[in-house]
Image: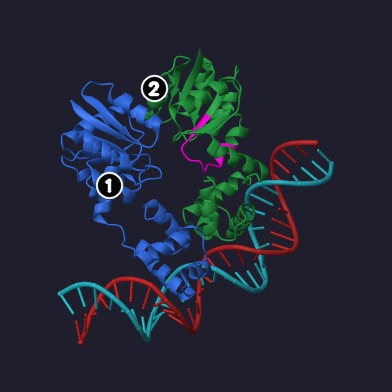
Chain colours: A blue, B green, C red, D cyan
Amino acid sequence: MTTVLLVDDHPVVRSGLRAVIEAGDALTVVGEAATGEEAIVLAGHLHPDVVLCDLRLGSGIDGIRTTVALRALDPAPAVLILTTFDRDAEVLGAIEAGAAGYLLKDVDPEVIVQGIHRAAAGDMVLAPELATRVLKGMRSPLPRLTDREIEVLRHLARGATNKEIARTLFVTEATVKSHLAHIFTKLDVDSRSRAIHVAQETGLI
Amino acid sequence: MTTVLLVDDHPVVRSGLRAVIEAGDALTVVGEAATGEEAIVLAGHLHPDVVLCDLRLGSGIDGIRTTVALRALDPAPAVLILTTFDRDAEVLGAIEAGAAGYLLKDVDPEVIVQGIHRAAAGDMVLAPELATRVLKGMRSPLPRLTDREIEVLRHLARGATNKEIARTLFVTEATVKSHLAHIFTKLDVDSRSRAIHVAQETGLI
DNA sequence: CGCGGCATCGCCCATTTGGCTGATTCCTGG
DNA sequence: CCAGGAATCAGCCAAATGGGCGATGCCGCG
């Protein structure tokens, strides 16, 4: 019997997962957690074979940090990430963090059940919609922006003008333009709107 | 016995809702639909007392259009909207479309059950997190953008330049600028970046 | 120490954007 | 039928943006 721990901030989703998982008789849900913190504590006590973890967990730590902590346990459970959205950066982050795989929430129940079995067996589980994306991400890794550039990017995404960003960061407009020029080069774009778009698409911000 | 029809594009969420709804014995789920179209057909046959409908339904028609169609049925079911995000401008549209109310997906199961009972009784059901927002929205109603303006806004959010938008929509740049000027006025902004930001914040796109 | 990356700033110039005014056509609701 | 909103286009002008080039100071690393 494979044991599963559910981690999702939505009670309804937990109920649904429990229902589809326990529909067969080879899997049993040994616990539920609403937050990453809770999940880590529970996993330490319950030693589940597989942790099914939402990527976004409301206010607390996110799925990736939770994964890191879970994989540090002994024995370490296989961590299967669930999410609604397919953001590149987070997929890669989850894999790097030691997740056994990645499933989209809108798949059929049996896919989830199969995924849990394969994760328990030590296999890698990737939603087909994401597999190619992940591989592509491996080939052309995301551009590495500096902390300062990320900071500028955030202000950009909030719709700030160069002047406003400069005031906020206590630098001159020239500096902001310089950062922007670097950002544009790294993201391979030529306008702030497109920079915002790419940054959001890839999960950079 | 109050009958309920579930509408959500995620099988897992439907299972979860079914589980929490049928935990008591005053409610029964008479059907499930994965799309708005399916929901309308099923509701016509099943005549549920309440339809529990996700605001976002993947590829097909959205929750609002579904609500409009459902309310046109005879007898018309009470429509209770479920949503994950509280920043949805669409909740206002849902109310206008005749929804009996809306709930956030991350509430406790009993709140959902209570909401269904109250909707079936003809009451208005508002998640407290959203009630104030709705009232605020009533006082200063969200800007009403035309279909064309929304279309331009979407291209804008993808980072397109005026020239690109013009080419895509088969109009001149002057027209695009005209649309943008209207959008800016309605959103009370003065730059494309900020227009994108408020549009995303308010769930306009 | 010297090299490179980072953050900071300056200047110049072409392009894009945004604000303003005004015009035409079409369609819809009273 | 007429008023009004919507979509289409035009021209003008100021401001913001983006690109290119260079410069300085700082810091970590081999």
**Label for residue A94?**
1
**Residue drawn at 49 percent across, 70 percent down:** A166
Is there any visible trace of residue B75 in the rendered image? yes
* Above or below: residue B72 compared with residue A56: above
Query: Numbered disc 2: what chain?
Result: B
Does residue C9 appear left or right of residue A5 in this picture?
Answer: right
Q: Position of residue B10 (x, y in %)?
A: 39, 31
Q: How far, Cα to Cα, is label 2 from label 1? A: 30 Å
Residue A75 in magenta stretch: no
Q: Is residue A38 left or right of residue B193?
A: left
Residue visible at 36% across and 27% down in the picture: A15
Q: Residues within 10 Å of mark 1 (few under 14, many from 20)?
A: many
| Magenta range | B81-92
Q: Toward the viewer: A130 or B21? A: B21
Label 2 sits on residue:
B19
Question: Where does the image place residue A38, in percent across and percent down from the top left?
Answer: 31, 39
